[in-house]
Image (tube, rainbow, N blue to C red):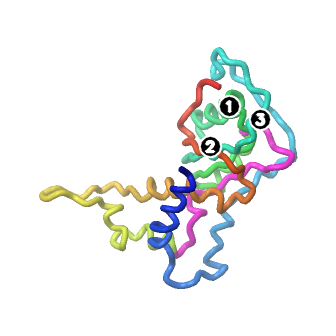
Amino acid sequence: LFAFLISIYASINLKLIKPEVELSSKERSHFDQVYIDPYAPFSHPLINQFLLGPYAPVNKSNGMDAVVMAAGVDATLVANIHNLYHLQGFRRFVFAVNNASINCPAIFDIVPQHGHKKKHYCVDHNAFYSQTEKQRLWNVSGEFERIHYGSPKSGEQSVQKSKMGWYLQQFSKLLIPTLVPDLSKKFLVIDGDIIPNRP
């Protein structure tokens, strides 16, 4: 299924945001919005019995990476990370957030383990797109106007709340491997406001 979605994205959507001119290295500087866990290997897996419920914590890694999509750090994200680690066996995390320069350092402080081999990653939602691409995507009167304002029925007003951010988040889930070269072959993508509650 993942390969199928990638093929659809590559064949249709990449054409929509492909710049008309080749991007310079300066324009491709959006990769500086990728943050890598700065801590030396160590573990501080704090356990909250209320979040665990009746289940015992999992002591063995499941071998998969967890990709967590979140706006920023809040109590729900903390519970999400806690249970992915203790109930699901995830040991390596990749985060996609807003305002990465602020949120990524805070996230690295709350992840339970800092790996010996694979560092945690934290990226800005905008890190997947160059400045040229972002200008095209967020031009509300440009080629993606219907995504920003909707396609109203006869006699109705346009939708004023843009859906572009939601669409880009879905594409970001598919583009994560382009920014994290050592991502596990199989990985979980989950929103930060979802809290798994059983093994």
Mark 2 crowdedness (10 Å alpha carbons): few <14, some 14-19, many ≥20: some
Q: In front: 92, or 192? A: 92
Residue plotted at (62% across, 31% down): 79
Secondary structure category for the residue under label 1: loop
Q: Say above or below: 85 vs 171.
A: above
Please provide the residue range marked out in magenta.
111-132
Measured from the top left, where is residue 39 in percent x and y? 83, 48
Residue 72 shown in magenta: no
Residue plotted at (29% across, 59% down): 150
Identity, as a three-letter code, of the amino acid under mark 2: Leu
Mark drawn on residue 88: 1
Secondary structure category for the residue under label 2: strand
The reply to whether the C-beta atoms of the residues labelled 3 and 1 are less than 8 Å apart is no
On the image, numbered disc 2 is attached to which residue? 188
Measured from the top left, where is residue 89 in percent x and y? 72, 33
Q: Is residue 69 left or right of residue 82?
A: left
Measured from the top left, where is residue 168 in percent x and y? 48, 58
Measured from the top left, where is residue 192 in percent x and y? 57, 40
Distance in Å between CA atoms under marks 1 and 2: 11 Å
Considering every residue shown, the one lying at the far top of the view is 54
Q: In front: 98, or 115? A: 115
Mark 1 vs mark 2: which is more N-terminal?
1
Q: Which quarter of the image is occupied by the C terminus?
A: top right
On the image, numbered disc 3 is attached to which residue? 61
Residue 116 shown in magenta: yes
